[in-house]
Image: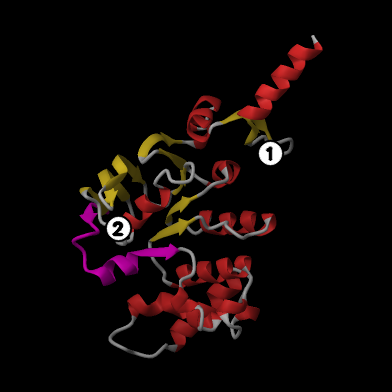
Amino acid sequence: MRVTFDRVSISLGGAPVIQDASLTIEPGHTVGILGANGSGKSTLLRSLYRVVKPTSGTVLLDGADVWTMPLRKVARNVAVMAQESESEFDLDVLDVVLLGRVPHRKGFGADTQKDLHLAEQALTDVGSLDFASRAFSGLSGGEKQRVLLARALVQQSRVLVLDEPTNHLDIAFQLELMHIISNLGLTTIAALHDLNLAIAHCDEVAVMQSGRLAAFGRPEDVLTPELIGDVFGVHSHRLRHPESGQLLIAYSSRQSRQTTSLQEKVQQ
């Protein structure tokens, strides 16, 4: 399913947060939304799953405006992995995952055997089946992220949205999670902080800066030292992984760079 943001602008409390953002995510592609804190990454994603309505422009699924679709239809096509909410604190893990089946139910029907099978399979896929009967509130941050991913998977949508999915995760599961989502064959959009994870697992990246789309394209083409310095305020170097040859970005703060230069001058 193709996702299009067409000249989207969003204001919150009268203040502009997103300004005239346009990009298209092709079916089956994984796209990372990158940017400094406050750049508008999460707000742009929330306009797709109908939490924040654009003040102008349109958000489209295969050419249809999501804000004119029935909400159930949007929920069947767009699954979201976001941070946990207070409403989930008193639920067992299996019940949290089964919330992903709500868009497929008719009326107030109970969970079916199919629902239970899909939930257990999703928990197995993220390595969390042993947590099924535990209280969601008693899990660690990383364990919660696994369960929230399972809830998104059990929704069986065509578009997957992930808002900072690697928060609270150790390095091993960061890599595992990104490998899982990039091999699902879904149209996937993820707000990320780690540029190297985006390089390794995303077909394209969209870089946000102060609410505007600064760049969009293949990671190797977009993530230049000049752009990284402008957007993130750090120095960077493009390296190659010693085994795979894949691009890696190494960072250093501008302050440390200035300190090194000053020390070199003193030594001279």
Other residues around mark 1 within 10 Å, as few (<14) / some (14–19) / many (≥20) = few
Residue 47, how many percent across, how many down?
31, 55
Quadrant of the drawing holding the N terminus:
bottom left
Residue 52 tag number: 2
Residue 212, how many percent across, how many down?
35, 38
Residue 71, how many percent across, how many down?
26, 69
Other residues around mark 2 within 10 Å, as few (<14) / some (14–19) / many (≥20) = some
Instruction: Reply yes or no: does residue 62 show up in magenta.
Output: yes
Q: Nearer the viewer, residue 147 or 157?
A: 147
Q: Is residue 75 left or right of residue 96?
A: left
Q: Residue furthest top?
A: 268
Against 64, is 221 above or below?
above
Q: Would you name the residue on which mark 1 appears?
A: 244
Q: Residue furthest front?
A: 266
Instruction: Reply yes or no: does residue 98 show up in magenta.
Output: no
Q: Earlier in the sequence, mark 1 or mark 2?
A: 2
> Can residue 237 be seen in this snapshot?
no
> Which of the colour schemes (rainbow, by chain, secondary structure, one colour) is used?
secondary structure
Quadrant of the drawing holding the C terminus:
top right
Q: Is residue 17 left or right of residue 263?
A: left
At x 42%, y 88%, the residue is 112
User: Looking at numbered disc 2 in the image, what kind of residue is underneath it?
Assistant: Val
Q: Is residue 149 left or right of residue 236?
A: left
Q: Secondary structure at mark 2?
A: loop
At x 37%, y 79%, the residue is 102
Cβ–Cβ below 8 Å for labels 1 and 2?
no
Residue 264, how many percent across, how many down?
76, 15
Q: Secondary structure at mark 1?
A: loop
Q: Nearer the viewer, residue 244 or 148?
A: 148
User: Looking at numbered disc 1 in the image, what kind of residue is underneath it?
Assistant: Ser
Residue interval drawn in magenta: 61-81
At x 69%, y 36%, the residue is 241
